[in-house]
Image (cartoon, rainbow, N blue to C red):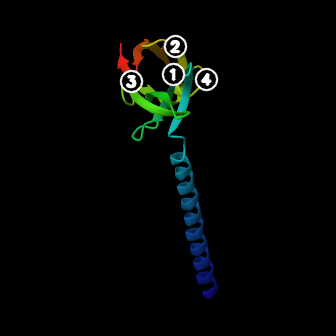
């Protein structure tokens, strides 16, 4: 009877250890998900020595499938690019993260080295839906204006 209790106690202890190990592995997996990239630059263009334009995908903190797109303008200052303005393209969390950060995400990014500089952006909604309607902006003296 004593050996039966010892075996049961050992089995119970092993079960607890196994459950703890599996729980720790599960916690590690969820931490790996939270370590996924939160931002990804999806396009960049330099307009002469005046402006640098970037489009960055920002993953939603509330919905892992949603994202926003940030348009940034940089101007040259003391030999380095310094951000001069930023705007959101479309709605906050209005894009899908995976198409936005995958191949063919930027359907159109066009601009010109003029003052003011016209800027047109069209991004992939989903592979089945295709591209968004173009969003038009103007960059004037380092500031972004909706066109």
Q: Quadrant of the C terminus?
A: top left
Q: Residues within 10 Å of mark 1 (few under 14, many from 20)?
A: some
Q: Secondary structure at mark 1?
A: loop
Q: Is residue 127 visible?
A: no
Q: Secondary structure at mark 3?
A: strand
For the residues labelled 2 and 3, the Cα–Cα distance comes to 14 Å
Q: Secondary structure at mark 2?
A: loop
- Between 74 and 86, the residue placed more toward the observer is 74
Dividing the picture into quadrants, the one containing residue 135 is top left
The residue that label 3 is drawn on is 143
Eyeballing the image, is 46 above or below 36? above
Query: Is the C-beta separation of discs 2 and 1 under 8 Å?
Result: yes
Nearer the viewer's eye, disc 4 or disc 2? 2
Of the two numbered discs 2 and 1 on the same chain, state the one appearing first in sequence: 1
Q: Which mark is residue 103?
A: 4
For the residues labelled 1 and 3, the Cα–Cα distance comes to 12 Å
The residue that label 2 is drawn on is 113
Q: Residues within 10 Å of mark 4 (few under 14, many from 20)?
A: few
The residue that label 1 is drawn on is 50
Q: Residues within 10 Å of mark 2 (few under 14, many from 20)?
A: few
**Residue displayed at 56% across by 49% down:** 32
Q: Quadrant of the N terminus?
A: bottom right
For the residues labelled 2 and 1, the Cα–Cα distance comes to 8 Å
For the residues labelled 4 and 1, the Cα–Cα distance comes to 29 Å
**Residue displayed at 54% across by 43% down:** 36
Dividing the picture into quadrants, the one containing residue 140 is top left
């Amino acid at each position: 009877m004593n050996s039966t209790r010892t075996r049961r106690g050992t089995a119970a202890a092993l079960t607890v250890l196994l459950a703890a190990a599996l729980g720790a592995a599960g916690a590690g997996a969820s931490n790996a998900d939270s370590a996924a990239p939160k931002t990804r630059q999806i396009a960049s263009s330099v307009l002469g020595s005046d402006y640098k334009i970037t489009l960055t995908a920002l993953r939603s903190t509330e919905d892992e499938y949603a994202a926003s797109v940030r348009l940034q303008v940089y101007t040259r200052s003391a030999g380095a690019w310094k951000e001069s303005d930023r705007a959101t393209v479309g709605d906050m969390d209005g894009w899908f993260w995976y198409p936005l950060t995958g191949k063919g995400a930027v359907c159109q990014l066009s601009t010109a080295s003029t003052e003011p500089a016209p800027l047109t952006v069209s991004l992939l909604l989903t592979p089945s839906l295709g591209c968004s309607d173009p969003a038009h902006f103007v960059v004037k003296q380092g500031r972004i204006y909706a066109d």
